[in-house]
Image (spheres, rainbow, N blue to C red):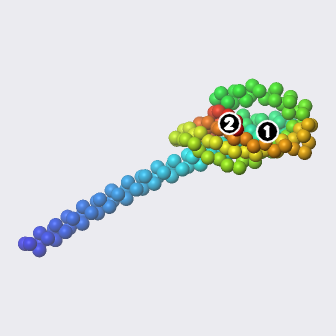
Amino acid sequence: MIARNGRLLLAWGLSVLLVVALVGLTLSVVALGKQRAADSERAGATKAARQLALDFTTYDYQTWDADSKRVVDESTGQFKQEFQAGIDAVKTDVVSNKATSKGDVKEAGVVSNDKDSAQVLVIVNAVVTNTASTTGTERRYRIKLDMVREKDRWLTADLQVVG
């Protein structure tokens, strides 16, 4: 009788340990899934911010329409409206000065994010040429971008050159 109770107690104890292990494994898998989703959201926002910063700092007076269209296509909200409103005036200056700019994204990092929004800082070096500087002048931009996800696509809602 004692041996039988001992085996029953051992079986019960092992069953409890198995349940605890399964619960722990399930919680770990759920936490890992959430972490992967958060990493994916940050990566998506960062990739879109890098691309917008590159497109914003890369243009040529001969291809201004296509260059500015890329920025519009990657934007939303007030930033998109403001950028579109200024396209013609900027085009006049860019074309009359035969301006070009070739951006090169050096660094980008997410400052804050959730599943549908992110704030990303991007550092871009650009070489700018125009009629006054045909050899080019290097400029360094620090750009803060507010990104929002619309229909599984990250778009720029605000852009501020911060340094």
Q: Would you call the spot at circle 2 few (<14 residues within 10 Å), some (14-19), or many (20 or more)?
A: few
Side (left or right) of 48 relative to 100: left
* Residue at the extreme bottom of the image, as rendered: 3
Asked whether 50 or 123 is in front, the reply is: 123
Spot occupied by residue 138 in the image (x, y as percentages of width and height): 81, 44
Name the mark on residue 162.
Answer: 2
Q: Residue at x 54, y 38 (%)?
A: 116
33 w.r.t. 139: above or below: below
Name which quarter of the figure residue 70 lies in: top right
Residue 31 position, x and y percent, is 43, 52
Q: Is residue 31 left or right of residue 78?
A: left
Of residue 122 and residue 14, the one placed in the foreground of this image is 122
Quarter of the image for residue 48 reads top right
Is disc 2 in contact with disc 1, using a CB cutoff of under 8 Å? no
Q: Position of residue 75 (x, y in %)?
A: 67, 35
Can you tell which quarter of the image residue 112 is in? Answer: top right
Secondary structure type for disc 1: helix
The percent position of residue 23, horizontal first and vertical second, equals 33, 56
Viewer can see residue 75: no
Q: Give the label, 2 or 1, closer to the camera.
A: 2
Tell me what residue is drawn at x 35 percent, y 57 percent. 24
Looking at the picture, does residue 73 appear above or below residue 19?
A: above
Return the residue at label 1: 67
